[in-house]
Amino acid sequence: MTTILRCISPIDGSIVAERPTLAAADASAAIARARKAQADWAALPLQARIDMVLAGVARIGAMNDEVVPELARQMGRPVRYGGEFSGFTERASHMAGIAEAALAPIRLEDSGNFRRLIRREPHGVVFVVAPWNYPYMTAINTVAPALIAGNAVVLKHATQTLLVGERMVRAFHEAGVPQDVFQNVFLDHATSGALIAAGEFNFINFTGSVEAGRAIETSAAGTFTPVGLELGGKDPGYVMEDADLDAAVATLVDAAMYNSGQCCCGIERIYVARPLFDAFVEKAVDTVRGYRLGNPLDQATTLGPMAHKRFADTVRAQIADAVSQGAVAHVPTFAEDDGGCYLTPQLLTGVTHDMDVMRTESFGPVAGIMPVDDDEQALRLMNDSDYGLTASLWTPDVDRAEALGARIETGTVFLNRADYLDPGLCWTGCKQTGRGGGLSVIGYHNLTRPKSYHLKKVTK
């Protein structure tokens, strides 16, 4: 039986788009076409692949006036922020710029007797399962380097952003990337799992929940298919006693609330040196009370609805549970809070690590703030988490931050900034945040396999 995928707008509950899922046989046929086309794609000169990928990126940019309101209707981000094209092109351009060096053979010897080298070979068909919260930027993290490295890509996007995959493949096809080399597919979970279990793909990249990541690993078990996973997060910020308080408040509050808190590396818990605690809370609360919650298609809106009511319900439940245990909620309920997708942003004090809001991923516009007495207490609390994606440290002392960062169980350590993905650095996590790494030179290494050549020359 065919499943119909429906994107329901968080703005008003209307249906934005509907698409039927592929039957298993049709999905397998699409993958077979990708596999057949991949060899010719990989045989093209590297610069030819780079040029077509960058042309595809530019085509997305040309669609931006359509993309921004379309995204607002699909997942609720306010149009005032202009969409994702800046980060989208920054990441793709960086990966294009380092491709030649990152994919270059490692040459050990070319003497009269031997030629020895290691080449990077594309995996083959890469399956990208992309999330809805930053649907273009998260997808391009893998799509661009995978195609540049010579892989074919099959993209499955989240139902909440059903139209994104179609736009991406259309743009890349218009730029010259062959249709079978980059395909968008609509699949239900059962079919996706069956394709993975059958070993249909050569590499799988997934961004999403811990539960879904576990399901993908289970499906891939025994196939020896490499899997890259970016899963949950509970990213901390730590404001030390010598921090620039105004900068820390502005950045950490924005990192907690931007995109209605629906950011992979958004800040969800904040630890503040006790001498700065009261001032930090006062400034942070003033900032959040100034947000304008409303229709994301309105240029005046600074905070849109959460992407789905069930996500907002999770955050409301965490806040209510924390308050029932003695936490203090500092932001009065906004008039626009409808008990559904439109949710009042919230800051909590009096929180402890016995509360879900400080331990379980929220993925919404809420943050708990705790005072700490020293680096050791802050370190213990930051590491008291099942997740490890990023941590944001605030101090003018770079050496202190680097030394502390070495002891934090995380994938990225930020100093005096937060919630940013640097494409020159490996995007990675630890613990239940996942495994593998994207972007940077390491991203290319994960999207290719090493192949060694030990060539003995015939000598007389």
Image (cartoon, rainbow, N blue to C red):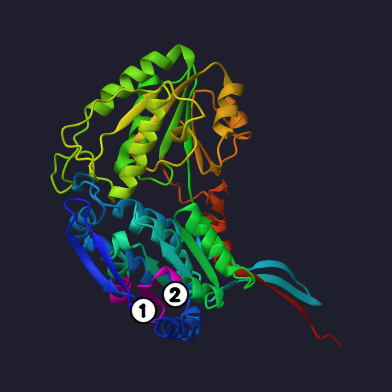
Residue 197 in the figure: left or right of residue 326: right
In front: 421, or 175? 421
For the residue pair 256 and 414, the one nearer the viewer reads as: 256
Q: Give the percent coordinates (x, y) of residue 87.
A: 35, 51
Residue 394: in sight, yes or no? yes
Quarter of the image for residue 449 reads bottom right
Residue interval drawn in magenta: 169-191
Q: Amino acid at mark 1?
A: Leu
Q: Is residue 315 above or below residue 157?
A: above
Q: Percent from the top left, x then y, of residue 407?
A: 63, 33
Whole-percent x, y for residue 392 in the image: 48, 33
Mark 2 neighbour density, 10 Å: few (under 14) some (14–19) many (20 or more)? some
Which residue is tagged 1? 22
Residue at 50% in and 70% down? 149
Please say if 399 is above or below 295: above
Say which residue appears at 51% left-offset and 83% top-offset. 39
Taking the magenta stretch, the answer to whether it contains residue 352 is no
Look at the image and tell me in which quarter the C terminus lies: bottom right
Disc 2: which residue: 191
Horizontal placement of 364 versus 105: left or right?
A: left
Q: Is residue 130 left or right of residue 297?
A: right
* Left or right: residue 157 compared with residue 113: left
> What residue type is disc 2 on?
Thr
Marks 2 and 1, the one that precedes in the sequence: 1
Kindly identify the residue that appears in the image at 21 percent across and 53 percent down: 72
Q: Quadrant of the N terminus?
A: bottom left
**Pointer 2 with pointer 1, Cβ within 8 A:** yes
The picture quadrant where one finds residue 261 is: top left
